[in-house]
Image: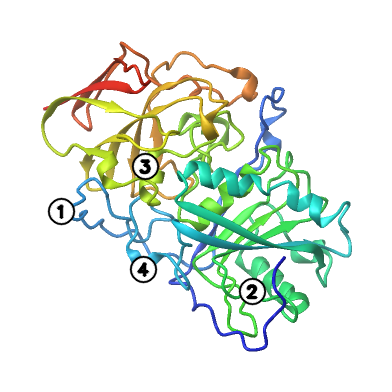
Amino acid sequence: MASPKRPDATPSGTQGAGPGGGRRRLTRTGLRCAALGALGLLAVGSTVSAGPRAPALHASPPPAARPCALRAVPGVAMSEGFPDDSSRGPGAEFAPSTGTVRALTLLIDFPDAPAPYSAAERYGEFFPAVKKWYAVSSYGRLDYRSTPVLRYIRMPRPFTAYGIGRGYGWDAHTEMMRDLLRVADHDIDFSGYDILNILVTPNAGPPADEAVLSVTWTGASAATTDDGAHLDKVSLIYGHDQSGPRVLSHENGHALGLPDLYAADDFPRTDRLAGQWDSMSLDWGLQGDLFTWHKWKLGWIDDRQIACVTGRTDATYTLRADEVRGGLKAIVVPYSRTGVFVLEARQQLGNDRDACRAGVLAYRVRTDVDSGKGPVTVVDAHPHTSACDFSSGAFNSLNDAPFEVGQSYTDPAAQLTFTVLGRTAAGEWRIHVTRR
């Protein structure tokens, strides 16, 4: 339980570094669901902003000691590049991604939508599953600690008064957060937390299969407590999403600085970008972990676990699966100041225990592409087929994307050719890479 408010509490942070954006998710179909209905009913995600965003600037080069760690591009919404050290922590745009991360988790309902069951039941839909998901994905480097207030906080106005709908904006969010403090600030201590989770009673708003409203706002404070704590990294979960607790893992991923990988403006073909291979993409899918690039960016993988290829090479590398601790995790080939080609191995283990295929996954990362616009694109090793179609009614084109033993691929932009040679006795993948 959260501690009562302390009379002598001190401010815990300052205003966010700049106008940030809520990072909206799209609708999900749910694991092993039947075919989707009319696509017109789906809630296509969008990025909502707390204010005007600066235009994209030229990317600065990565440091000489880390030539594959491309820099985040200023003005790009949740750039896939590596942020500077000032971007994390109290008052910064993103929460810490290693060590102990503290989340205050509140539950709210409304006069026109009273909670249909207990706060403990609603909380149990997400915890301890989210804590375990982060522990597994981060190889134990992120200790996620949620402190719940196990009662519903009744908001002072009806749900309909806030105008919460698909793509709702900063003004509506600000009104809700200020109202939340009106009824909760007097007896809940908001200080000392990195993330605020708000689990909304599931009967507020439309069902998730009609319009997904779950959203994360980061980078600007919507409200400030009497003690000076800023509500600047807030994830709100609405409805009953069939992706289960992974909806919160996804939303908190935004608070850590990860973008949406689905196509916000082209939902019917959104699986053709990153498919179900990262929970920041189609998080209902069979493959529930994160890309190695994301794990490196978050500090869960060390530089020594990345084979950074910046010049000519003709070499064989041995990759250990993304889901397994230790070992070489990825081959990264920068081909421009804002683009890299990545090779990693995936297996049916851990958060990917239900994965459709094992093999070598290849993808391109662009640091100059906004969240929701396709910053990561997976190369399909089997472009004319899909697989594990039971996982989703229409979004399975990349389920069989990994390259298998004997397959090769040439990427003109990165000027490389790779061949999957085989597997070692320990199950690692041997890959030959040639770059001229």
Q: Which residue is mark 3?
A: 293
SS under mark 1: loop
* Whole-number angstrom distance, CA of label 3 to CA of label 1: 19 Å
**Residue at the limit of the structure toward the bottom, as seen here:** 8
**Which sits earlier in the primary sequence, circle 4 or circle 3?**
4
Q: Nearest to the eye among marks 2 and 1: give it.
A: 2
Instruction: Find residue 304 and report its horizontal and vertical position in percent.
Output: 25, 43
**Which sits earlier in the primary sequence, circle 3 or circle 1?**
1
SS under mark 4: helix
Q: Nearest to the eye among marks 3 and 2: give it.
A: 2
* Whole-number angstrom distance, CA of label 2 to CA of label 1: 41 Å
Q: Which mark is residue 86?
A: 4
Depth order, front residue of 24/128: 128
Instruction: Find residue 51 and report its horizontal and vertical position in percent.
Output: 51, 68
Q: Which residue is mark 1?
A: 64
Q: Which residue type does callout 4 highlight?
A: Ser
* Whole-number angstrom distance, CA of label 3 to CA of label 2: 33 Å
Depth order, front residue of 244/424: 424
SS under mark 2: loop
Crowding around mark 1 (Cα neighbors within 10 Å: few <14, some 14 to 19, many 20+) is few
Horizontally, residue 418 falls left or right of residue 202, namely: left
Crowding around mark 2 (Cα neighbors within 10 Å: few <14, some 14 to 19, many 20+) is many
Q: Which mark is residue 342?
A: none
Q: Which residue type does callout 1 highlight?
A: Ala
**Which sits earlier in the primary sequence, circle 2 or circle 1?**
1
**Which sits earlier in the primary sequence, circle 4 or circle 2?**
4
Horizontally, residue 259 falls left or right of residue 216, namely: left
Q: Which mark is residue 190?
A: 2
